[in-house]
Amino acid sequence: MIDDDQKQRMAQLEEKLAAAKKAHEEPEPRADEHYSMANQAWRMVTELVAGLVIGLGIGYGLDVLLGTTPIFMVLFILLGLAAGVNVMLRSAREIQDKQMAEAEKHADADKDA
């Protein structure tokens, strides 16, 4: 039979295991996983410039192939600008959604405490 000392040690071990499992359920996010606002701004600028450069390349290539004046280059630069702004706005919306979700999470945690 199991004596009281062994039962007590088993209960302590189970408590330690439960505490360890609870600590590993919700790990704190690492600081290096979060992007700073400067990184996010550079990301948006890069997306805008990439849209412009791609539009420029496609338009210039079509103008050279078809032997036209820079009509396609101007048209595709404008399309690239529109695409870059669209991607930039989508990134800004994504960042805003993450910040709002994080704020709600903190508000819920403060309310529970």
Image: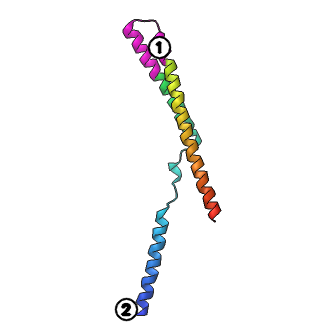
Q: In which quarter of the image is residue 1?
A: bottom left
Q: Position of residue 4 (x, y in %)?
A: 43, 92
Say which amino acid is labelled 2.
Ile
Residue closest to the eye, 16 or 105: 105
**SS under mark 1:** helix
Q: Name the residue under label 2.
A: 2
Q: Mark 1 points at which residue?
A: 73
**SS under mark 2:** loop
Name which residue lies at 45% across and 12% down. 72
Q: Where is residue 69 in the image (x, y as percent from the top left)?
A: 46, 6
Give the vertical position of 101 relative to 8 (above or below).
Answer: above
Q: Position of residue 50 (x, y in %)?
A: 48, 27
Residue closest to the eye, 112 or 52: 112
Name which residue lies at 53% across and 37% down. 91
Magenta residues, start to end: 54-76
**Around disc 2, counting alpha carbons within 10 Å, would you say few (fewer than 14), some (14 to 19), or many (20 or more)?**
few
Residue 72 magenta: yes
Residue closest to the eye, 84 or 40: 84
Name which residue lies at 62% across and 64% down. 112
Image quadrant containing the C terminus: bottom right
Disc 1 to disc 2, how far (Cα)? 85 Å
Q: Position of residue 61 (x, y in %)?
A: 40, 14
Name which residue lies at 46% across and 81% down. 12
Give the vertical position of 57 relative to 85 (above or below).
Answer: above
**Numbered label attached to residue 4:** none
Give the vertical position of 60 relative to 88 (above or below).
Answer: above
Q: Quadrant of residue 67?
A: top left
**Around disc 1, counting alpha carbons within 10 Å, would you say few (fewer than 14), some (14 to 19), or many (20 or more)?**
many
What secondary structure is the stretch in magenta mostly built from?
A: helix
Q: In which quarter of the image is residue 93?
A: top right
Residue 49 magenta: no
